[in-house]
Amino acid sequence: MSTAANVSVVLFTSDLRLHDHPPLRAALGSAEQVVPLFVRDDGIHAAGFPAPNREAFLADCLTDLDAGLRERGGRLVVRSGDVVDQVCRIVVESDADEVHMAAGVSGYAQRREERLRRALESEGRRLHVHDTVITALAPGAVTPSGSDHYAVFTPYFRRWAQERLRDVLGAPRTVRVPDAVSSERLPSRKDVAGVSEGLSTGGEKEGRRRLAIWLRGSLADYADRHDDLPGDATSRLSPHLHFGTLSPVELVHRARAAGGPGADAFVRQLAWRDFHHQVLAARPAAATADYRTRHDHWRSEDSAAEEIAAWKEGRTGYPVVDAAMRQLLHEGWMHNRGRLLTASFLTKTLYVDWRVGARHFLDLLVDGDVANNQLNWQWVAGTGTDTRPHRVLNPVVQGKRYDPDGVYVRRWVPELEGLRAPVVHEPWRLRGPERAAYDYPDPVVDLSDGLVRFKRARGRD
């Protein structure tokens, strides 16, 4: 006689896929019917986290997830409101015995999980939380002696690389959903205002297409070209990792199977993602508070208002900084090297609090992720896990090194289209009528002045 429960609920969060989905597979293994549920969470909206680019990409993902479920005889159930309230309502409507979901790492995700566990247990139901859904290795799976997490990446990576990852799970063939459970209308990208013009398409189908192209093509050259700004030789899979349309476990396995220096370099970047997640899981306050080294001498937003506005709009007068910021505005995405140098410019040349930059990035980035965004900003600002907190990235040197022919700059700063390298990275060196021919601002600050201010302020910390 079968002991399977009649109905289970799978609560999708940042794992909007059918391939390699442990909560879904566990629910299907324990129940005759499953409710695949996504809740448009009022708590996340109240915190101001949703942004047009992520809302549009999310709509694509939900539409694609629903289509994949329908191909298997099921459908996606969408509700809006408080997650705990909505899950409990679904449990009552479907008479489900248990709920499956992926483990989160942010303070909000941890509190949400605990609230849901208590609410379900009070009704005699169970919550099953699954690791290695959003990350390749679970936060806390490896720890150093005397601490609950690694604060430095290199020793973390040594341990991470030694761990055996779980096997990749296939997508289910059939999903049976109770007829009586109703759903709201799926959101649509066209309903979202303020979306970046060049925003990419979301969804598991698109993510797997991009992954296949990446594995066949640029992966082999990734070790040599991942900092190549004009070549755009990165995977561009970060939005799909953020929304979980691709599995980090599967990406590690498939990259390792491909082999070579490019695959090794790519796997290392996936480990960096896990590293930041394990830091945030252990120290949720790092989303808003300095993680390691506290700095209290940032310039006020009022005193730096003009420079901050110029940075956001891509008109600082430093071409490679402006190019990267304009790419962000147009695509809702930015090359990783651009993220590093624009963050360094804001925090260590303009000496503006990292939280100002992190907030702006979260307003626009389609892959805006609390763990990676906030902790990368802290790494650059010198308040996080960087073992060289005083390093400063010179935007002129960076431009000449990673965009030697000025192709990236001219792509995003068309005012400088007529200039060639190396002067395209230093247009202020032009004089007289030649300079006047280019409608491009002078630098908002001299780099030497910014460095003096940075050193003076840090000397007080």
Image (cartoon, helix red, strand yellow):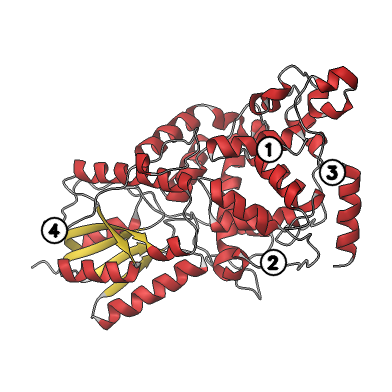
Q: Nearer the viewer, mark 4 or mark 1?
A: 1
What is the distance, in whole Å, between disc 3 and disc 2 at their CAs? 26 Å
Disc sitting over residue 178 in the figure: 4
Looking at the rendering, which quadrant does residue 403 occupy?
A: top right
Residue 211 lies, with reference to residue 25, above or below; the image says above
- Amino acid type of the residue that numbered disc 3 sits on in the rendered structure: Val
Vertically, is 271 above or below 431? below
Numbered disc in front, either 4 or 2: 2
Q: Give neighbour class at mark 3: few <14, some 14-19, many 20+ (Cα, 10 Å).
A: some
Looking at the image, is mark 4 or mark 1 earlier in the sequence?
4
Task: Measuring from the top left, give residue 391's x and y in whole percent.
Answer: 81, 51
For residue 245, say whether it is visible. Answer: no
> Relative to 415, is 138 on the left or the right?
left
Q: Which mark is residue 445?
A: 3
Residue underneath mark 2: 290
Q: Secondary structure at mark 2?
A: loop
User: Which residue matches tag 1?
Assistant: 314
Which residue type does callout 1 highlight?
Answer: Gly
CA gap between label 2 and label 1 equals: 27 Å
Name which quarter of the figure residue 444 lies in: top right
From the image, state whether disc 3 or disc 2 is nearer to you: 3
**Residue neighbourhood size for the residue with mark 2, other residues' Cα within 10 Å, grouped as few (<14), some (14–19), many (≥20):** many
Measured in 3D between alpha carbons, the distance from the residue under mark 4 to the one under mark 2, in whole angstroms, is 47 Å
Horizontal side of residue 94 vs 36, given as left or right: left
- Label 4 and label 3: CA atoms lie apart by 62 Å
